[in-house]
Amino acid sequence: MIAEFGLAALWLAAALALLQLVAGVAVLKQGETASPAISALVRPSAAIQGVLAAVAFLALLVVFHQTDLSVKLVAENSHSDKPWIFKIAGAWGNHEGSMLLWVTIMSLAGALIALLERRLPEPTMIATLSAQAFTGLGFYAFLLFSSNPFERLAPPAPQGMGLNPLLQDIGLAFHPPTLYFGYVGLSIAFSFAVGALITRQVTPDFARAMRPWVLGAWIFLTLGITAGSYWAYYELGWGGWWFWDPVENASLMPWLAATALLHSASVLAARDALRAWTIMLGVVAFSMSMIGTFLVRSGILTSVHAFAVDPERGSFILALLAINIGGALTLFALRASTVAEGERFSVTSREGALVVNNVALSAILGIVLLGTLYPLLTEAFGVRVSVGPPYFNPVSAIFFLPMLLVLAVGPLLRWRQDSLGRVQKQVVLIAVVILAALAGVAFSTSIGILPLLGIALSLGIAVASFMPLIGRSILRVPLATWGMVVAHFGVAVALFGAACDSAFTQERLLAAQVGETTQLGPWTVTLEGVDPVAGPNWTAIEGRLSARYGDGRPTEITPQSRNFWTPPQETNEAALLTRWNGQLYAVIGEEGEDDRWQLRLWWKPFVTLIWYGGALISLGGLLALIGRVANDLRRRSVQRRGATRRGEQPS
Amino acid sequence: MRWLLALLMAACALSAAPLAAQGTLPPAPYAYRQLDDPAQEAQATELMETLRCLTCQGQSVVDSDAPMAGDMRHQVRTRIAAGETPEEVRAWLIDRYGDYISYKPSISSVTWPLFAVPVLLAVVIALVLRRRLGGRK
Amino acid sequence: MNKVRWTFWVPLALFGAFIVLVGVQLFRPANDEVASAMIGKPLPEFDLRPASSTRPGLDTADLSDGTPKLLNIFASWCVPCAAEAPQLAELERAGANIVGVAVRDRPEDVAAFLSRYGNPYSRIGADDVSEVQLGIGSSGVPETFVVDGNGVITYQHIGDIRPEAVPLLLEKLREAGQ
C-alpha cells in the first residue's frame, strides 16, 4: 500500500513539473500580455511538486524500514537482520533509491526558490523555474519509465539479499545524501543561469540571488568529499585518503566548478564584471554533477558494469544529458555574445586575483576531466592506458600552486584597481614566511618537491588568511568576510595535513607473534593478544595492541578483520589512535605460519588536519551563507518598512 | 560517491570468488614484508602505489589483498633488492602487460595529448589574462 | 567581437565530442581483459619444481624443444579451471601437447584436482609466487598460451576454454608448428 502511495505521489509530482514547465513557457512566450492567472501557477506548482517528491521519498524510507520484501528494491538491497539505521540507509544505497533521492532534492530545491526568491524580475524567475522543471521532468521520466523504485515482487522474497558490508558504516550511510545535496543543489545555479540567458538579465542582482544557493550546495559538496575521503581512509584499510579514482574525480569536478562559480559570482555581484563567464560556470557546475554521476553509474569508466545489465538506462541518461547540457550550452553560445562583458579592471585588483583563481580552477577541472576520460578515449581505439596519481598530482600542481600564491595576496587587494605597493608590508611578510619555511624544511629533511612546496605555501597562507582582518574592528567585520578568512585558513590546514602525510608517513609491515614488540617512528607497539569476537551480522578476529608514544602511557587499540555473511565478504576495521600531531593506524590481516599475525602499522603525522581543513572550509562557507542571508533579510525588512511608510503617507 | 567505489570493489571481490579462495599457499615472502633497506623499501612502495592490481582493477597493488597483488609486490621488492631501479621494474611490467598496468602514463604516440593539453591550457590562460587584464584602458 | 563569438561554441563542441565518445562506448561490449604484451616474444627464463608427484616440473628449455605446445595456466582453487577440463582433454586427444602451470597451489590439492577432473598435462610446474604468470603477462587463471617450437609465445587465450574455442586453439597450434 505504502509503495503504491509513494508511486502515486511521484506521478503527481511529475505532472506538476509538467504544469510548471508549460505554464512557464506560455508566460515567457506571451511576454507582457501573459495572463496573470497562468503566471500565478508557476510558483505553487514548484512548491507542491517539492512536497510530493518528499512524500514519495518518505514512502521509500518507510518501506525499507519495514523491510517490506514484496518490494523488489528492498528484497535486493536489504535484510531483516540489519540494524535499523542501515535499513534506512539502504534506501539510497542502490540505483533506483539514489535516483529518487536525486529527484527529491532537485524538487525541494526548486520549491525553495519558488517560495523564497523575490528579488529578481518575475520573467527571469519564471524562466528559471521553467528550466528547473524541464531538467526535473527528464529525471522523473527516467525514474518512472526505467528505474521505478516501488516495483513489486510477486511472490515476495522470503529474505533480502543484504547490503554490501562496506556500506554498513554510519559515516558512509550519510555520505551519499550529503554529496547529493551538493550535486543537485547546483541544479539551482544551472536553472538561474539558463533563466538569465533566456531573459538576458545577467546582472549583479542575478549573482546575488544565485550566490546563497551555490554556497549551500558547495558546503554540502565540501562536507561530502571530506567525509568520503575520511571514510575511504579508515574503512578501506590501506591508509590512503585520495586515489584520483574516477569515482572520486566525479565528485571533485563539480566541486572545482562550484568553487570557481562562487568566486566569479562575487565579482559579478560586487563589480558587474565576468558576466558571460559566470553564466558559463553556472551551466558547467551542474553539468559536471550530471556527467560525473552518469560516468560512475554507467560503469563506463570502471569496467564493473552497473548499466551493462540494462543498457537502456545508460542511453536514457545519456539522452537526458545531451538534451539538458547540450541545450544550455547552445543557448549560451547563441546568447552569450549579446551579454556585454561588463566592467573592466586592472590585474592588481581583487577582481584580477579572482580571475586567476577562476582560470586556475577551470584548468584543474579540465585536467581532471581529461585524465579521467582519456583511458576511455584510447580504449575506443583499442589501446588501454591508465592515468593515476603520478599524472594528476604534478600536472594539477602546475596550476594549483600559483593559485595558492594568489590566494594569499588576493583578499588584501581592493576592488577595481590597487597596487602591490599599498600592501607591501603584508606581501613581504607572507613571502618571508614561505621562503623561511621552504629553506627550513629543505635543509632539515629530504622530502619531495611537491610536499615541500605544499608545507611552505600552507604556512604562508595560514598567516595570510588572517591579514584581511588587520586594521579592522573585529566585531564589525562582516560575517561573509569571516567566512572567507576561515575557509582560506582551512585550505592552509588541509594542505599542511596532505603534505605532511605524503612526506612523513612511516609504514611497518610485520608478521607478529603474540607478545612481539615493534618500533614505528615515535611509537612502540606490542601485540598483546588475538581474540575472536562477534557482531550482529559478522564475526571477526580482533587484535589487541598496546601502543605507547615516546615514554607515555600505553593505550590499547583493537583492529578487526571482519567476516560478514549476507553477502559473504571480508572487511578490515582499522584501529586509529589519534594524537594532536597525527594518527597511528593499525590493521590486522590473516594468520600466517607459526602463529604469526599479519600487522600493518602506519604513523601518519598531521594526517587529521586534512579533514579538519575540509571541515573549516565548509564552516567558512556556512559563515558566509549566514552573513549573506542575514544581510538579505535585513535589506528586505528595511524595504518593507520603507514601503509601508510610503503607503501610509498619502492617507 | 565513495560508496560506489566500495560497491565496485565488492563486486570485484565477489565475482572473482572470495579472495581467500585464490590460492592455497601462504602469501609470497615479500608480499607483506618490507625490504630491510629503508631507502629501497621507499622506492618499492612509491613504485607499487603506481601499479594497477590485475585482480581488482580499480586498486593499486599496495592497496589490494588479492594474492596476485601480493605476488606483484614480491616481484617488485625482489627486483628492487637485486638492484634494479623502479623505472626498470616498471618498464619490465609494461613490456608484459602494456601501459594499462602503470598509473604513470609515459609520453608516447598514444598519450601525448595528456601532456600537450595542460601546456595548451597554460598558453591560452596566459594569452587571455594578458588581453583581459594587461591591455587595460 | 567576431573573434570572441566562435569561442562561445567551444564548450558545446567539446560536450558533443564527449557525448559521441560515451555513446559509442556505451554500446561496445565490456572488455575487462588485460591482453599480454608478450605475443611474438620468447618466454622468460624459469625453472619450476613439479606441482604434483605424477608429472615432471617445467623449465624454459622444455618449451623450446622443437614441438609447439599449449601452456595452460590453472589452479585447483579456480572454478573455471574445472569447467575447461573436458576441453583440455579434447585438445589432448586431438594431439596437442599441453603443459601446465599451477598457480599458488599445494601438491596435494593439485593431485586431488587432477584425479577428479583428469590430467591432460605432460609436465606441470608449480608457480608459487606468480613468477611465470607475471613473466608472460598473464593476469588471471585460467589462461592458455600457444608457444612455438623455439619457445616464442604466438597466441593467448584468456579465460576458460569453451567447446567452440577448441578448433581455434588447434588452428593456432598448427600455425605455430609451421
Image (cartoon, rainbow, N blue to C red):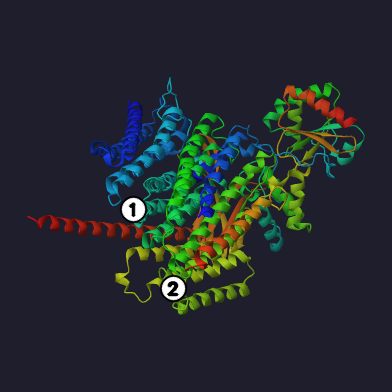
Q: Chain of mark 1?
A: A
Q: Toward the viewer: A79 or A281?
A: A281
- According to the picture, the residue beneath numbered tag 2 turns out to be A418
Crowding around mark 1 (Cα neighbors within 10 Å: few <14, some 14 to 19, many 20+) is many
Q: Position of residue A412 (x, y in %)?
A: 43, 71
Q: Position of residue A282 (x, y in %)?
A: 43, 50
The quadrant of the image that shows the N terminus of chain A is top left
Q: Secondary structure at mark 2?
A: loop
Q: Chain of mark 2?
A: A
- According to the picture, the residue beneath numbered tag 1 turns out to be A209
Q: C3 above or below C43?
A: below
Pick out the residue farthest to the right: C66
Pick out the residue farthest to the left: A651
For residue A127, what is the image quadrant?
A: top left
Q: Toward the viewer: A306 or A558?
A: A306
Dots 1 and 2: beta carbons under 8 Å?
no
